[in-house]
Amino acid sequence: MEFETLTQDINGVRTVVKAIGRGPAVLALHGAATLEGHEWARELADRFRVYLPFHPGFGESGEAPHIAGMQDMVVHNLHLVKALGLDRPHLVGHSMGGWMAAEIAAVAGEQFGKLVLNAPAGLNHPDHPGADLGAVPPQELPGYLAHNAEVAARYFPGGSECPSVEDFVAAREKEGPALGNILKAHGFGHPNLGRWLSRIPNETLIVWGDKDRMLPASQAPIWEKSIPNALTLIIKEVGHFAMQEDPRTVTAIGDFLAR
């Protein structure tokens, strides 16, 4: 089974969506970069139709310099769901995509099925701080993304899943400004996000690798307590790239969505 490429014009932004599988719809939102790809979705393709959009300015999607914060991304994705003709898709988000999914569910959760937040960003809790990426040497970054650094290293130059160095650099140069547009309002989160989570009506699964050095799994109980109908799954011996590092993570997500 191969990925299909769908293209939608969302308020003038060329938005590219990879899709795979058959079954109930799942909208899966990537994090602050696209370097790890979307191969993990193959593990869901025998049970679900998975839609994996590139955020505006990321991957194959067109640029959107008008983006001025996460709220623009919430509206963008609500328009995208309508354009794709999806009826109450499940919503999955990883890292920054988890923060995005949480904000979407807080304002429009009734339009979605179940919600999965995989190591979500956004809370910026002072007692459970995430990594200071500015202080992480580039050669150490794979160790922050995966407990087994070799798993993450394959997405960096020289790795088996990485394009040419030129393409890798070009992608990061394109995505950097797009990320900056999302973060320009409040940085990597929103000061009131914790107050909004109680509005989420969806049955929610919070997934976290217990060795996550990017965003600590100690945040998971805060998310679970704040969302009315939530439970937590801690994956042992994996890091921030839990879905890439251990396929059982994706199987567990699929089992939750299928219940």
Image (spheres, rainbow, N blue to C red):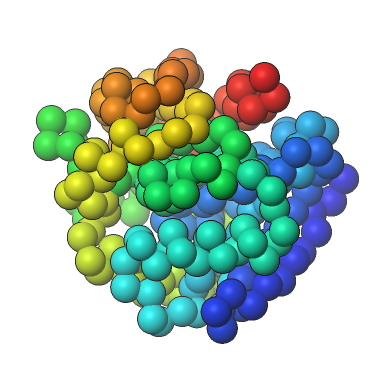
Q: Residue at x 84, y 51 (%)?
A: 2
What residue appears at the point 50 percent right and 79 percent down from the top-left corner?
Answer: 63
Q: Is residue 139 above or below residue 244?
A: below
Residue 43: image location, x then y, percent: 73, 33
Specify the quadrant that holds the N terminus.
top right
Q: Where, by quadrant of the figure, is residue 201 drawn?
A: top left
Which residue is located at x 46 percent, y 64 percent? Answer: 75
User: Quick one: 245 or 101, which is closer to the camera?
Assistant: 101
Left-right relation of 50 to 186: right
Q: What number of labels is visible? A: 0
Find residue 194 and report its horizontal and vertical position in percent. 24, 38
Q: Nearer the viewer, residue 33 or 152?
A: 33
Query: Would residue 254 be visible to someone looking at this image?
Result: yes
Q: Please give left or right for residue 82 compared with residue 6 in the image.
A: left
Residue 55 pos. (x, y %): 52, 64
Q: Which residue sits at x=44%, y=59%?
A: 74
The answer to whether one can see residue 45 in this image is no
Q: Which residue is situated farthest in the left direction here?
A: 126
Q: Position of residue 189 (x, y in %)?
A: 26, 51
Please determine whether, in this image, residue 210 is positioned above or below residue 86: above
Q: Quadrant of the C terminus?
A: top right
The answer to whether 81 appears left or right of 1 in the picture is left
> Which corner quadrant of the image does residue 73 belong to?
bottom left
Between 219 and 107, the residue placed more toward the observer is 107
Taking the image as shown, residue 168 lies to the left or right of residue 140, namely right
